[in-house]
Every structure is written in structure tokens, then in C-alpha cells.
């Protein structure tokens, strides 16, 4: 498409350019300021810089609070700023075009975008800068949304002033910026998949079918995970065993996949393209494997009710949903009813949301103090599938469902609700604040049922009803897998729900903060089978894309040692918390063997701890050099030359 | 991005639909070094998502998420995009899919158009802007919307008076009144059907009287009202521009209802209603907001917590089915509600200023008659495979997103990645077999 997109006079895009007089005036203003520097920040050496500043309205997210026009007008006064423009969405294609066009037309040599979090769009704008032919690291991202407009919603003047100072700081930083190159590392074209449930099997078989070597590590002695314990899967009603068998067969037959059963991850080191992983298999010594990417498909655990929660483990007539599925599977086809604790089951209660959708003050926290506030997503449909199966197999058995909301959201799932209703399943609806109560029936009434469930039923306008049943099935959901070791080894993040946390649910849904590590399936949160398979496919796609390149490319923000200044004191090595990122090496200097610090760019995360402790100031962080910090502080303190900054500071404070 | 593609162009894969599902699939394939053609029937890529205000559960602005993906696809060296183009048929034989395309006339030469919009500013003919759900006006020749890709003017032949003003002001002589639609056939090895959804009509249930009141609106209309760059830049009710003081959301107005032929759940309505209610209470702090629902289906990651937050914010959740909506003099609406909340008074009449009907998702395109892809009884693309949920009934044709049933954005994006992976391995295995065989 055309690259001749320009800023235009219309409500969406803003202003200026194309007006030579105005550009002249701006340049003149810049030069005037540049020849009259008022501080060290604006040294005359920098007068030649041509900086473009782009301020985003974020469709109102920023401009509803921050006076973006004022910001643009003010930052133009900063020496070196060649242009300052406002756009409704700088991240949009026209917005990005403006940046790359300006670089070409106006010979910009530095670019600042003041918009949202760098987490969202730093990469986007580096791309636009690169397309304009400028080194992408001569770019600064200023977050005036989270840090100005959102943080100071009720103080527009203060937010505007803060935005100006933040941009001034970025400009100061850019003055001392040097072009940087991405770090390129070798890419070991092999993926490690942790977990042999359906997510791991799917990810492994997808990658192998794409020609990529895979090592699949499963802690149990067989593949398939939880699905080995399920009967039929909804909505296809096919045998879960068939699904597992199909996937496992594909994995076992593919020569590109090595499967290690009864195996665990003992240690993980290295980085994207080159992870070193210690795998320990039962009865064997740990061995080290190398993998370019790691897919975490460790799955979930079933919620285990607490001692005496709805009489669980106190009364034999209370089962969890997985236990009930086992009961259904083990009951012979010839049986005329289910049998629990030696008694025929005439009436069954299914209680939804046990261990899910927990509320503060209503439910007991888990052992770790956490409430499971989330919905487990799969239990409603599973319960209705089972309820319907009971009604169809044992038509004399009464089935009662105690629910808050029926969440049969997926394709084909609503039919279970419709069919269960038609098949005579009776529904009671409770409020989350007042869950039903289960009691053992006194012996003299036990003929009617071993248990009685009492519910305030909102479908009958909060009438309190007591239902005698022979079996109570607790609709238990999913809780995070027991992977504390792996979380520690791989520095993974978990969300408030305890499941592994992705970077962003829409922008980077299967990636985590550690490059090269991907999430597949229920390790990330409750999902049904189709969703799990899709998530695994998405993770495989990301891994495959990574392997499509010969080398892994990383941002260059790592520590760099000035070999002349380093005196080998090794304080940096002591402080470094990333194993292997910094070490002492012996070098020959002027005929003498001396020790000097050396950085492993793949392992260094650019935290800066080494920079802080070096007595010689011999370590610097690329992209974040110490003089850049000084310039940023000056930029914040001084704001814009000629502006009354002291007053602004008071406002911000 | 290229708008001039010849029949000789042989992409590895064709993606039908340039919404979020199609774009994500295209990106995930292109990143694996496959050449991809994205075909979009509208004038811009971005689908429904680009028209949304904010998205649940993070409340990110939708543009913030969509525009970078649109832009990434448009700039990707392995991706070509054809807008204003419809797929008329897919003929599959011996593993080759011949995708028959109709590139509609835009009456603007895209090679010449620089997106300066001078034609748009000069045009005198205005009509209701479909992008703004009819609330704003658009000129007969216009760039589709602010962050559209491509930024090219398109002439609406239905409304154009052929006065010639646009041609006179165009600095690059890009206007071509005699442009003809163009047919072309693209041969490819794999297809991803990401043709998305439509919403069924608000007038589907006559008892809700949407045809008689402008203040009974569709959820997409509210999205535009809530969007900071929307038609009014604020929330006003359509009939008289009043700031609504009381807003009702009627859930399941187009789904879970066999009487209108949509028995399934549309999966996103609960969450977008809650999101819109939250945004409304931010935009109109004094407004009273009520959601009438059957079941709140807040099933996804972080969704239940989002629902609980909405309750804590004071949004009223009333469990009950709205039986009828009567327009009143002056524009207000009387809802007849059967609730389960009040035993004394289960049949209630409640008056609101503005009512939002949760329409149902229906398929956006029917490939069944014109391609080997079969649809299921719900009308969406059938996905019979147990282990490959994105595979259709036709070998080499895959599907992603709402083409295969209602889905939220998070699930759509995951599925788009899966479809891309499925297509890539299909192509890889074909090539491997060819090498061996």
C-alpha cells in the first residue's frame, strides 16, 4: 500500500505538516533554543539532532485527561525537537506511516512516542522507526497513559505537566542514545514439551508434523493425563480413550518425538534458542537436554473438597464429579441403578460450583489462603452431560441440579441443558452468598435418602426446600497444577487465580515473560478439550515461528563491560542473580594474565545490579547507560526551557 | 500490502476474512515463512473488533489491540491483502484449491490514491455510516474510518450522484467512474475460513419493538456510542439526544431462543453487557444500569472476577426474562419483566430510557453451497475432527474464530493460532510426501 500517507486536517488525525511556514517557524524556534542552552542537558553538541515526538490520544484514553495539543506545543520548545504531532491512534497504520515518512522526509534521527505502556507497543513503534530507515533503538517510548492520564484522572493540569516532563526525560535519554543491534543467538531446533496430557500431546504432534524435533516429558507412567479417567467427551460424545489413543499414537509413531515417561524436570537454565534442562527419569541418572523452546503443558489438578465440605469424606454418599464419572463407568451396563455404599441410588443431587466462584466471607480459603474466585468453565456442561446420562440409563433415578448459573456456553453445549430439562432433571437455583447445605438424614428417615440437601431456591422466590437424596455429587472444578518447582526453576508468573499467567490475553496469549517459554492448555486456566487443543496448537504455532528463523533475535539491553576500565574485582559477578550471566575470564593484558568480567548476552536480563556495584563504573547497560539516566533526571527536573518548572513540580507533587 | 494481484500469484494459503481471526492466522502462518493472501469483503481489514470500544476482561481499548495486528499483517512481507473482495467459490481438486474471487469496483485506483481524503471533504452526498451503526453520516466517497487499512477512498455507487466533484479535487487522478469489478482465480494449497459472524436483527422479536423505537438499540450501536472516537464522542440516546439516566440490558434477546431459530448460546453477550455496563457507569456516573439475564456466563479467565466487580460497582443484575418492551411517549421504554427476585410481585413493569438488546451471533458467510466445506446444523462451519478442532470436512481447508461458532476474542485468537498450525503442518507434510514420492 501507499507510503504516502500523511497527517491530515480531520478529527481523527492531526494537524500541521504540509505547511512550510509552520515548519520553518518550528525549526527556527528549535534553533533559537538550541543556541541558547540553559543547562547541561541541552549541550550545543546535540543541536544537530532532529527529534520527532508523536503524542497519542489513544482514542481519548489519554486526551480526555492530558491536554495533548498543549503537550505537543510545549515539547516543540525543547531544543532538537524537529516535529511534535498528535494522533488519535499512533499505533494504527496511518499513525505508523507518519513516523516512517517523517524520518525519511525530515531526516529525523531520534523518535519519541508518548502513548500507552511500552509493554503494548514499544515493538510496534520500533518497527515503524526501522521502516523509516532509522536504527530502531534510537527510539524512546513514554507511557503517558498508565502513568499520566490514568494515574491522575482528576488532575488534568498535573497530568499534562507530568506528560511533558516524561517526554523531556525521554528526549534527554535519546540525546545520549547510540544505535544498537539485536543480539543474535543460535537456535536449537528442538522443543521441550512438559506434560503428556492432551495439550502436550497436541503441541508435540503439531510441531513434529511441521518437521521440528520434540522431547516430551511426562511425570506419570502413561500419556493422556486426566482424560484417561473420563468416559465420553462433550459435545461429540466420543470416547475420551479414543481421543487420547489417537494423539498418543501420533506422538509415539513420529520419529521426531522422543517421549520420556515417569520423568521430571530437575533444573532449567539457558535462554531462548538454547535452554539446558535437567531431566530425571525414574531409575535413571539425570541427563541434560538442550531445547530452543519450552512448552509448559502441565495441566490442572481436580479440586479436592476440604475436610467435611458438604460432608465430603465424612459421608460415603458424597462424591466429587470425577469420582462420580468413575462410578458411572464402572457400573455394568446391565445394572438397573447406581449403587453407593451398598445402597441403590434413587435420587442424585449435583451441586455446582464446589471449589469455584468462591466468595470472601462465604467460603473457607484454601490451605494457601487463596479463594478460588474463578469459574472452572467445564463443570456445568460435565454435570449436565452426566445428569442426562443418568436419566437415560436409569430412568427411575431422580436427578436434581443445584446451580447458580448454567454455563453451557460452548458449541453444542446448550443442547445438554435443553435435553437434561426435557429428560426431567430438576433444577434449583441458589445464590452464591447462600450455598445449599448437606446433612446426613437421621436414621429413622433414612429410607427416603441418606442425605438431605437444603436450598433457598430462587426459582421459587427463595422458598427453602429440602430434597432427600441417596448421592450428592460435588461439581468440583479445576485448580492449578502442583508445579511450584517448575515455577521457581523457570521464573514463571502466576495470576491471582494461581494458574500460569500469559503476557497478555489477546496480544500474546500463549507467551510468558521469559522468552522462548510458551503455555499450552489448562496450566494457564480452566479450558475444555477443544479449547485446550486450540491453545496447544497456538503455542505450537509460536514455537514453529521461532524455529523458522536461523537465529534467535533478542533486544540488546544487556550489560557490557569496558575491558579497559574493569579491574577484575568481581563485585558484579557476586551481585548477579542470573546464573551464568556474568563471570570472570582470564585475559592477557600487556603480557600479564588478568581477570576481567564478561557478560553472557543470552542470560543477561539487563537488570542493572552489576552496574550499581561496579566501583570503576566499568559496566554499563546498553540502552540504559548512566549518562542517559543523568539526562533523564535533568529532563524531569528541568522540564522545558522557558517554562515555569518549579510551579509545575509543586503541582505534580 | 498489495492491491494488485494477478492470477499468477500462488500463495501457500488463502485466508477468507480479515477480522481478528483471519489476521492472527495469517500472521502465524507468515511467521512460519508461508506466503499468505488475506481476502476481505469490506473496505478495511479489522472486522468487528476494530469497531469495539473496549474489550473484556482487561478493558484495553479495542483499537490498541487490533490496530497493531492489522498493521503487522499489512507490513508483513509474506502477507498480501485484498480488500473489497468476495470469495465466490472454492473448487478443490487433487489437493489444489482454486479460490474464485470477485474484486468489487471501488471506483478509485488504489495505486494512485494517497488517502488524502480531499475527495471525501469535497463530496456533497451523505448517508448513514454503517461503521457507526447508522448514527453518523459518511460521504459517498470516503476512507472507511480513522484507523482503516488500507487508507484508501472507496466510492459508494449506490449513493453517488456522479457529480464529478471528487474527480476534480483528486490530486492524483485516482477516481475511475468506469472501473469494473474484476474476477480472478487464485490457486493455493490451503485455505483458512475465518469469515466471522453477523448479529441477528434487533427486530427479530416483534414484542421487543425495536422497529418502533430508536431507543431499543443493538449492542454494536452502544459500542460506537461508548467509543471515545465514536459518532457523538459521548453516550446519547438516539431518539432525542438525551443523556440516558436509566439503561437496561436485555440478555439472550437473540440467542437461547428456539422461537427465533437460535437455540445455542452466543457466548459473548453476558460479558460484553457487563463490560458495557461498567463503561456506561464510568461515562454516566448517575445512570441506573440494569442487566436482565437468565444465566450469567462469565466462564473465561478473569471473567467471573469481572462479573463480581460489576456487582460491587452497583450494576443491578435482575434474573428474569423480559417479555415485552413498549415504547412510551417521549421515547422511554416500559419493560414487562418476569423476575425470580420478588415473590410478592413477580410480574413487574419497569421504565428505562434506553434498552440494549443482546443479539445473537449467526454465521457471517455460508461456504456450504460454493465450496467443499460443510456446515453443521447450527449454520456454522462443521468441525468434525476430535483431535484437530480447526479442521473442516474438506482436506486442506481449516477454520478459525466465529466462523466455527460464537467465540470471544481470546478464544478466537487461540483458535486462529491453532488453525495456522494445522494448515502449516498440512502443507509441510504434503511437501515432504512430494519429496519422498
Image (cartoon, rainbow, N blue to C red):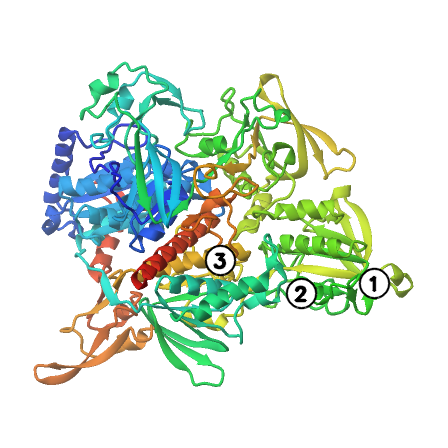
Label 2 environment density (alpha carbons within 10 Å; few <14, some 14–19, many ≥20): some
Is residue B35 or residue A650 the one in the foreground?
A: B35
- Say which residue appears at 64% left-offset and 25% top-offset: B207
From the top left corner, tell me how far across and down residue B21 is, in percent.
Answer: 41, 45
Separation of residues labelled 1 and 2 (CA atoms): 20 Å
Q: Would you say residue A635 is visible in this rendering?
A: no
The chain identifier of the residue carrying mark 2 reads: A
Which disc, if any, is residue A450?
A: 1
Q: Which residue is under mark 2?
A: A305
Separation of residues labelled 3 and 2 (CA atoms): 28 Å
- Say which residue appears at 72% left-offset and 30% top-offset: B348
Q: Would you say residue A631 is visible in this rendering?
A: yes
The chain identifier of the residue carrying mark 3 reads: A
Find residue A238 and report its image quarter: bottom right
Same subunit: marks 1 and 2: yes
Q: Which residue is under mark 3?
A: A533
Q: Report helix, strand or loop for mark 1.
A: loop
Separation of residues labelled 3 and 1 (CA atoms): 41 Å
Seen in the picture, residue B218 relative to A168 is either above or below; the reply is above
Q: Nearer the viewer, mark 3 or mark 1?
A: 3
Find residue A55 and report its image quarter: top left
Q: Mark 2 or mark 1, which is nearer the start of the sequence?
A: 2
Amino acid at each position: 500500500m501507499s507510503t504516502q500517507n500523511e497527517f491530515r486536517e480531520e478529527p481523527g488525525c492531526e494537524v500541521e505538516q504540509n505547511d512550510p511556514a509552520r515548519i520553518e517557524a518550528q525549526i527556527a524556534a528549535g534553533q533559537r533554543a538550541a543556541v541558547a542552552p540553559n543547562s547541561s542537558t541541552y549541550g550545543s553538541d546535540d543541536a544537530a539532532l532532529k527529534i520527532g515526538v508523536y503524542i497519542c490520544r489513544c482514542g481519548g484514553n489519554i486526551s480526555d485527561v492530558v491536554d495533548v495539543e498543549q503537550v505537543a506545543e510545549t515539547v516543540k520548545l525543547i531544543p532538537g525537537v524537529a516535529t511534535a504531532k498528535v494522533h488519535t491512534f499512533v499505533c494504527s497504520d496511518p499513525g505508523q506511516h507518519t513516523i516512517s515518512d517523517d524520518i525519511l522526509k525530515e531526516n529525523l534521527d531520534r523518535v519519541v512516542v508518548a502513548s500507552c505502556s511500552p509493554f503494548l507497543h514499544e515493538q510496534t513503534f520500533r518497527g515503524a522507526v526501522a521502516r523509516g530507515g532509522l536504527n530502531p533503538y534510537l527510539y524512546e517510548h513514554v507511557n503517558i497513559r498508565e502513568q499520566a492520564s490514568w494515574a491522575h484522572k482528576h488532575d488534568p493540569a498535573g497530568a499534562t505537566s507530568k506528560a511533558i516532563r516524561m517526554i523531556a526525560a525521554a528526549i534527554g535519554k535519546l540525546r545520549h542514545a547510540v544505535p544498537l543491534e539485536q543480539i543474535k543467538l543460535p537456535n536449537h531446533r528442538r522443543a521441550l514439551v512438559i506434560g503428556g496430557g492432551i495439550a502436550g500431546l497436541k503441541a508435540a504432534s503439531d510441531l513434529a508434523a511441521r518437521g521440528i524435533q520434540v522431547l516430551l516429558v511426562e511425570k506419570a507412567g502413561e500419556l493422556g493425563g486426566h482424560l484417561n479417567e473420563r468416559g465420553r467427551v462433550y459435545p461429540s460424545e466420543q470416547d475420551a480413550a479414543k481421543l487420547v489413543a489417537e494423539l498418543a499414537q501420533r506422538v509415539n509413531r513420529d520419529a521426531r518425538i522422543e517421549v520420556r515417561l515417569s520423568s521430571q524436570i530437575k533444573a532449567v537454565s539457558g535462554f531462548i534458542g538454547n535452554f539446558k534442562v535437567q531431566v530425571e527419569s525414574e531409575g535413571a541418572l539425570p541427563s541434560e537436554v538442550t531445547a530452543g523452546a519450552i512448552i509448559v503443558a502441565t495441566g490442572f489438578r481436580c479440586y479436592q473438597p476440604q475436610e467435611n465440605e458438604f460432608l465430603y469424606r465424612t459421608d460415603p454418599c458424597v462424591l466429587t464429579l470425577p469420582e462420580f464419572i468413575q462410578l458411572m463407568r464402572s457400573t455394568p451396563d446391565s445394572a438397573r441403578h447406581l449403587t453407593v455404599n451398598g445402597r441403590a441410588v434413587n435420587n442424585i443431587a449435583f451441586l455446582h460450583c464446589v471449589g469455584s466462584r468462591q466468595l470472601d466471607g462465604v467460603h473457607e480459603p484454601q490451605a494457601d489462603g487463596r479463594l478460588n474466585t474463578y469459574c472452572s468453565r467445564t463443570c456445568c456442561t460435565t454435570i449436565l452431560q452426566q445428569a442426562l446420562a443418568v436419566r437415560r440409563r436409569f430412568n427411575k433415578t431422580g436427578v436434581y441440579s443445584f446451580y447458580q448459573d448454567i454455563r453451557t456456553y460452548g458449541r453444542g453445549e446448550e443442547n445438554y441443558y435443553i435435553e437434561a430439562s426435557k429428560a426431567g432433571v430438576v433444577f434449583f437455583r441458589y445464590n452464591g452468598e447462600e450455598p445449599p447445605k448437606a446433612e446426613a438424614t437421621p436414621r429413622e428417615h433414612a429410607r427416603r435418602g441418606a442425605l438431605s440437601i437444603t436450598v433457598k431456591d430462587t426459582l421459587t422466590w427463595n422458598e427453602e426446600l429440602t430434597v432427600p437424596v441417596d448421592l450428592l455429587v460435588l461439581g468440583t472444578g479445576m485448580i492449578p497444577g502442583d508445579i511450584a518447582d517448575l515455577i521457581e526453576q523457570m521464573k514463571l508468573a502466576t495470576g491471582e487465580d494461581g494458574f500460569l499467567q500469559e503476557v497478555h490475553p489477546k496480544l500474546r496469549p500463549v507467551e510468558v515473560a521469559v522468552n522462548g517459554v510458551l503455555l499450552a492448555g489448562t496450566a494457564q486456566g480452566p479450558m475444555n478439550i477443544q479449547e485446550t487443543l486450540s491453545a496447544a496448537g497456538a503455542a505450537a504455532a509460536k514455537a514453529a515461528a521461532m524455529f523458522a528463523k536461523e537465529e534467535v533475535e533478542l533486544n540488546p539491553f544487556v550489560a557490557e563491560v569496558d575491558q579497559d576500565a574493569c579491574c577484575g574485582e568481581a563485585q558484579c559477578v557476586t551481585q548477579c542473580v542470573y546464573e551464568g550471566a556474568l563471570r570472570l575470564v582470564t585475559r592477557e593484558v600487556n603480557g600479564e594474565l588478568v581477570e576481567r568480567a564478561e557478560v553472557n548476552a543470552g542470560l543477561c536480563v539487563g537488570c542493572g545490579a552489576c552496574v550499581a556495584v561496579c566501583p570503576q563504573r566499568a559496566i554499563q547497560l546498553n540502552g540504559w547507560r548512566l549518562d542517559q539516566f543523568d539526562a533523564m533526571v535533568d529532563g524531569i527536573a528541568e522540564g522545558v526551557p522557558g517554562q515555569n518548572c518549579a510551579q509545575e513540580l509543586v503541582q505534580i507533587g | 500490502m498489495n492491491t494488485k494481484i494477478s492470477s499468477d500469484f500462488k500463495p501457500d494459503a488463502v485466508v477468507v476474512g480479515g477480522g481478528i481471526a483471519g489476521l492472527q492466522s495469517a500472521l502465524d502462518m507468515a511467521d512460519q515463512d508461508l506466503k499468505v493472501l488475506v481476502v476481505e469483503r469490506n473496505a478495511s481489514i479489522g472486522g468487528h473488533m476494530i469497531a469495539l470500544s473496549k474489550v473484556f476482561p482487561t478493558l484495553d481499548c479495542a483499537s490498541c489491540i487490533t490496530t497493531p495486528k492489522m498493521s503487522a499483517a499489512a507490513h508483513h512481507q509474506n502477507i498480501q491483502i485484498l480488500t473489497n473482495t468476495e470469495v465466490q467459490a472454492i473448487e478443490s481438486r487433487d489437493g489444489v484449491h482454486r479460490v474464485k474471487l470477485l474484486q468489487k469496483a471501488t471506483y478509485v485506483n488504489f495505486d494512485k490514491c494517497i488517502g488524502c481524503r480531499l475527495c471525501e471533504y469535497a463530496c456533497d452526498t451523505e448517508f448513514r455510516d454503517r461503521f457507526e451503526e447508522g448514527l453518523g453520516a459518511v460521504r459517498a466517497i470516503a476512507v472507511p474510518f480513522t484507523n482503516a487499512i488500507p487508507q484508501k477512498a472507496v466510492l459508494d455507487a449506490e449513493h453517488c450522484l456522479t457529480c464529478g466533484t471528487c474527480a476534480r479535487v483528486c490530486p492524483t487522478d485516482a477516481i475511475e467512474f468506469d472501473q469494473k469489478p474484476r474476477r480472478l482465480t487464485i490457486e493455493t494449497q490451503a485455505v483458512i475460513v475465518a469469515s466471522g459472524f453477523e448479529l441477528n436483527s434487533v427486530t427479530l422479536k416483534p414484542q421487543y419493538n425495536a422497529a418502533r423505537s430508536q431507543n431499543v438499540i443493538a449492542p454494536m450501536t452502544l459500542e460506537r456510542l461508548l467509543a471515545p472516537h465514536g459518532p457523538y464522542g459521548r453516550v446519547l440516546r438516539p431518539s432525542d439526544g438525551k443523556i440516558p439516566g436509566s439503561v437496561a440490558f436485555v440478555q439472550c434477546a437473540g440467542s437461547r431462543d428456539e422461537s427465533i431459530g437460535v437455540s445455542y448460546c452466543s457466548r459473548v453477550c453476558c460479558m460484553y453487557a457487563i463490560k458495557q455496563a461498567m463503561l456506561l457507569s464510568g461515562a454516566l456516573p448517575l445512570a441506573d444500569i440494569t442487566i436482565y439475564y437468565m444465566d450469567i456466563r462469565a466462564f473465561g479467565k478473569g471473567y467471573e472476577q469481572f462479573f463480581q466487580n460489576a456487582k460491587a460497582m452497583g450494576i443491578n443484575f435482575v434474573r428474569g426474562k423480559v417479555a415485552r418492551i413498549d415504547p412510551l411517549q417521549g421515547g422511554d421504554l416500559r419493560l414487562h419483566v418476569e423476575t425470580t427476585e420478588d415473590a410478592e410481585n413477580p410480574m413487574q413493569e419497569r421504565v428505562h430510557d434506553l434498552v440494549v438488546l443482546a443479539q445473537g451471533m449467526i454465521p457471517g458467510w455460508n461456504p456450504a453451497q460454493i465450496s467443499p466445506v460443510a456446515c453443521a446444523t447450527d449454520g456454522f462451519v462443521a468441525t468434525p475432527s476430535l483431535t484437530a478442532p480447526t479442521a473442516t470436512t474438506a482436506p486442506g481447508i481449516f477454520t478459525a474464530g466465529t466462523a466455527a461458532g460464537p467465540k470471544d476474542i481470546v478464544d478466537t485468537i487461540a483458535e486462529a493460532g491453532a488453525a495456522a498450525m494445522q494448515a502449516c503442518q498440512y502443507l509441510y507434510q504434503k511437501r515432504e510426501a512430494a519429496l519422498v514420492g
